[in-house]
Image: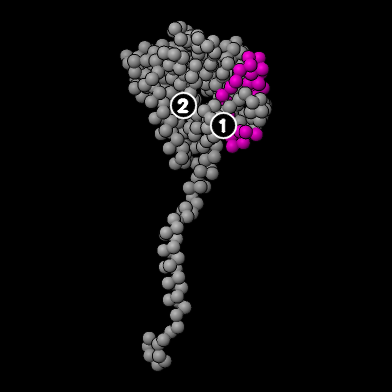
Amino acid sequence: MKVIPLAADSLGVRSMATYVECGETRILIDPGASLGASRFNLPPADKEWDALKRANDRISAYATRATVVFVSHYHEDHFRYDPAIYQDKNVWAKDPKRMVAPRQAGRAALLWKAIHGRCRLDAAEGRRLETPDAVLTASPPLSHGVDGTDLGYVVALTVTDRREGTRFVHASDVQGPLSPVAAAYLIRERPNLLYLSGPPAYLESQIGSALIERGIASLLGIMETTGCRAILDHHALRAGDYRDRLRALWQTGRVQTAAGFLGLADASLEAHRRDLWTARRKAPAPMPMRARRLNAKRSSAMMNARSAPNHAKEGTTE
């Protein structure tokens, strides 16, 4: 089984877009990416826009390979309206009418209308697909964070490689998970590799430390029970001190960011947006050596002219 994170917060954008390949079964999960419109009262910096373009290009490229497209929910960092992403695919998408938040329901209706007739489209919840290479199983609705949240519900996807016997679970925005129901479901799925959004430490001042600790403990419990490794990204990486705040998870040696899973350095741009804007306002980069020499010659000539003696004769008007 190949698991390839395509876009993620650790790769510079809000996303959990992932490509999974088991033989001839090729799945594109959550094919969306976006930027936080305002963070620290600042709009996205140029580097973030560049990262978003790269992310969307990558998602589009892998969409051409996919046989299945899966949409876990209707936040715009998890799907795109572009019909080309879904054309002629087997598409599983969160039920647009059942257990969906009001704002997401509007987006869901737009997406289903845009791609209707272009693909085989089914509500994802509880679906199962068996191919010669893989078994795909979608979860029932799981809370987008704590139980009862007004953020609605997400659907997790389990991909089992029939030849290797390995299991990958993409749990989307379960945020920890913060819901005991979501945690129990993930344990029951027995993943070898689990990809999920971590506890939203960047909102700790609003939601309290207890919820962050609950999310940490929940993931530690899942890993201890199942023995799985985890890709932890998305909400978890939006705090500038995410390495320190979630230290208990990184110290297990079994948790990586999406970038780390790919062997890359983290580039969580949103968490460092203030630094990006500060860098943009700095003095221009140093001039090349040739330009510096020319500038030095001009400065020397000007200094010599200013220090030259006045040869005008007394009694003249010069």
- Badge 2 marks a residue whose secondary structure is loop
Q: Which residue is mark 1?
A: 237
Point out the image quarter for the C terminus: bottom left
Q: Residue at x 64, y 28 (%)?
A: 250
Q: CA distance from mark 1 to mark 2?
A: 16 Å
Q: Residue at x 41, y 34 (%)?
A: 53
In which quarter of the view is residue 245 placed? top right
For marks 1 and 2 on the same chain, the one whose residue lies earlier in the sequence: 2
> Which SS class for mark 1?
helix
Looking at the image, is mark 1 or mark 2 nearer the viewer?
2
Q: Nearer the viewer, residue 145 or 8?
A: 8
Q: Going 45% across and 58% down the picture, which residue do you hit?
A: 289
Q: Name the disc covering residue 6, or none.
A: 2
How packed is label 2: few (under 14 Cα within 10 Å), some, or many (20 or more)? Answer: many
The range drawn in magenta is 215-244
Q: Is residue 218 magenta?
A: yes
Q: x, y (%) of residue 217?
A: 67, 22
Asked whether, in this view, residue 115 is left or right of residue 49, the answer is left
